[in-house]
């Protein structure tokens, strides 16, 4: 046994012993992921320290990543020796003084702010509907460890998979174990991970690379960011194991520059891993060498496509190239290159510790394991959820997500980001499975899941996502560059009541052409929101075209705001909120909206407390 390996094993025993020992003083955990910080975690942390100093209280304050309940941020946990870990939700600096005085000083929790009691990483909040149907593998350590402490990662079996691989397994055995697990790439395409590694292993050449695609650009997606912020070592360990399997000595973490906190924590994690001989030359004295660099992306959505990403790493403009050859045969600087995303690599350590059969025991026949989803939109419980493959969309939205905000009616779910599709209520019992989702016209994607309620116009949704992909097109191939623009023009006309039924047929034909003829995944999937909304919500398109109305009342060119004289109290609030002075009337008398001046911004509707401002068809009075 090498001196480095012996030192690591000794350190592992010490940190595990420390982690498992009973705590001797109170502990306070503060959620310091981007979601927590955006909600005010920095101010809460400062207030906590000030209040504790004020009362001369001593406690261990630990900064942790996101545990998934983003809806409840800022989250603060308090734990006393021998007592449960109590979680407070929606904490503000004003609430801190009471929490400190009542709980930390008097040992009496402030029950009206408590959202639960933390149990174990596998089942954080027993009985909480948000977690009941979850299965945490990738997110298991998030919210439980300080992401900037390598010792806390090691204490929860971190780098145990790497030690096992380097001391007991050949590269071929590692690949077979990953193949046995059935792990498919979580970046969207769902290609078998072990098979990709095998291709790269067998590809000729002495120089090979491992790349992590952390260029998470989907609107409403934050899975990768949260993992990098909450458990960066899991991704690093997965990449080292993959590098050993394929024979790579160098790797890149391609992270978009808009993720400064993730980059900061990754840099520290890489430095700490190097210091402990887990990265660099002669890892743990085993003779295997591998090191990592971070490449900050400039935020181009197209760089999520693997060949465009590789071009960006090499200092070229991020544009895709035709395949084959695939990156596993010819990637960075024409060398065999493996590209997997954050979630894929984060699954690897668990597979190597617990075995491929363990991972394959979860999920469906062709989609094994779990999947992390970012729940956003009109769902009650926004946040991160990791669920077993095979769970239905209905279970995710209504059981995990808590249903629709405000008790409104479900209308559709957009799954797979701008490349995905919009599925109606009739498909809510579709299992989360790569192949079954593909049959609906949608895709798994990286895991963005946007819930839409009955106030959403599906034409407008299709236009929103197509506008995004059209602006993000690199422009290299004509079908994507020109096709998405022409599709967007047709959608604009339809949303303004200028479209025809012939336009709808042309839109469908063009969408299919763009899908079939585009060079890369961006263009090939850009039509999905358009095709699925036409497929499942054709009646809304026809309402815009034939009746010149928007059933959801969302397309401003097809609605008119007017005031119900019987409901109006003449409070003048609507007139004061109107930015163009389109509302007139005397105080305590019904007001009137001048349609010629109205810009249809909806400010009057939002400000009226009596429901007097209504929406009608074009020309309503």
Image (cartoon, rainbow, N blue to C red):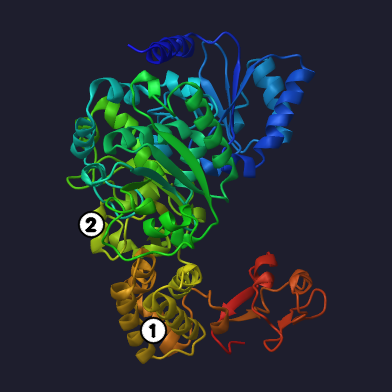
Q: Residues within 10 Å of mark 1 (few under 14, many from 20)?
A: some
* Above or below, 316 relative to 347: below
Position of residue 285 measured from the top left corner of the image (x, y, whole percent): 37, 19
- Given residues 147 and 290, the one toward you in this image is 290
Number of dots carrying numbers: 2
Q: Which residue: 76% across, 25% down?
A: 50
First-in-chain label (2 vs 1): 2
Q: Is residue 415 visible?
A: no
Residue 542 badge: 1
Quadrant containing the N terminus in the rendered view: top left
Q: Is residue 297 left or right of residue 130?
A: right
Among the 4 quarters of the image, the one containing residue 44:
top right
Q: Which residue: 37% across, 36% down?
A: 249
Quadrant containing the C terminus in the rendered view: bottom right
Residue tagged 2: 436
The residue sitting at the right extreme is 587
- Given residues 132 and 60, the one toward you in this image is 60
Residue 167 badge: none
């Amino acid at each position: 046994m090498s001196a480095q390996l012996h030192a690591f094993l000794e350190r592992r025993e010490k940190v595990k012993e420390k982690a498992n020992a009973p705590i001797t003083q109170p502990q306070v955990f503060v959620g310091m992921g981007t979601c927590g910080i955006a909600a005010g975690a920095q101010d809460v942390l400062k207030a906590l320290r000030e209040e504790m100093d004020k009362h001369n209280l001593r406690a261990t304050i630990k900064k942790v990543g996101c545990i998934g309940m983003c809806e409840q941020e800022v989250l603060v946990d308090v734990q006393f020796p021998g007592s449960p870990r109590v979680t407070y939700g929606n904490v503000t600096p004003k609430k801190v003084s009471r929490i400190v005085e009542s709980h930390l000083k008097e040992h009496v929790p402030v029950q009206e702010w408590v959202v639960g009691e933390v149990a174990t990483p596998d089942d954080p909040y027993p009985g909480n509907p948000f977690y009941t149907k979850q299965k945490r593998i990738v997110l298991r350590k998030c919210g439980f460890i300080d992401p900037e402490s390598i010792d806390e990662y090691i204490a929860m079996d971190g780098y145990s998979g790497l030690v096992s691989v380097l001391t007991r397994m050949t590269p071929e055995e590692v690949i077979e174990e990953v193949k046995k697990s059935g792990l498919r790439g979580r970046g969207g395409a769902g290609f078998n991970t072990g098979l990709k590694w095998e291709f790269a292993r067998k590809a000729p050449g002495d120089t090979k690379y491992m790349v992590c695609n952390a260029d998470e650009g989907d609107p409403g997606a934050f899975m990768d960011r949260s993992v990098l912020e909450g458990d960066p070592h899991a991704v690093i360990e997965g990449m080292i194991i993959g590098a050993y399997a394929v024979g790579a000595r160098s790797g890149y973490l391609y992270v978009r520059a808009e993720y400064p906190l993730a980059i900061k924590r990754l840099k520290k994690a890489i430095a700490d891993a190097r210091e402990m001989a887990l990265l660099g030359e002669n890892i743990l004295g085993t003779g295997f060498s591998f090191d990592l660099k971070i490449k900050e992306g400039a935020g181009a959505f197209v760089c999520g496509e693997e060949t465009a990403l590789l071009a960006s790493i090499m200092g070229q403009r991020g544009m895709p190239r035709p395949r084959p050859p695939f990156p596993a045969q010819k990637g960075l600087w024409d060398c065999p290159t493996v590209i997997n995303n954050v979630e894929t690599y984060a699954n690897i350590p668990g597979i190597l510790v617990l075995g491929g059969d363990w991972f394959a025991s979860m999920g469906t026949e062709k989609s094994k394991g779990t999947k992390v989803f970012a729940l956003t939109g009109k769902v009650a419980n926004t946040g991160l959820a990791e669920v077993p493959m095979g769970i239905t969309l209905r279970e995710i939205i209504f059981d995990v997500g808590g249903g629709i905000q405000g008790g409104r009616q479900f209308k559709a779910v957009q799954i797979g980001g701008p490349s995905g599709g919009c599925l109606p209520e009739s498909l809510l019992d579709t299992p989360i499975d790569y192949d079954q989702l593909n049959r609906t016209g949608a895709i798994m994607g990286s895991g963005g899941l946007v819930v839409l309620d009955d106030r959403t116009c599906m034409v407008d949704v299709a236009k929103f996502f197509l506008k995004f992909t059209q602006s993000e097109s690199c422009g290299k191939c004509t079908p994507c560059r020109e096709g998405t623009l022409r599709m967007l023009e047709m959608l604009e006309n339809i949303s303004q009541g200028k479209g025809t039924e012939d336009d709808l047929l042309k839109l469908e034909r063009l969408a299919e052409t763009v899908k079939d003829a585009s060079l890369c995944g961006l263009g090939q999937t850009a039509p999905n929101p358009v095709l699925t909304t036409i497929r499942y919500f054709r009646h809304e398109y026809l309402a815009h075209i034939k009746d010149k109305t928007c059933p959801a009342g969302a397309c401003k060119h097809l609605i008119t705001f007017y005031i119900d004289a019987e409901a109006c109290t003449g409070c003048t609030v609507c007139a004061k909120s109107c930015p163009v002075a389109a509302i007139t009337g005397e105080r305590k008398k019904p007001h009137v909206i001048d349609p010629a001046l109205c810009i249809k911004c909806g400010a009057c509707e939002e400000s009226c407390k009596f429901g007097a401002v209504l929406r009608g068809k074009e020309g309503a009075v």
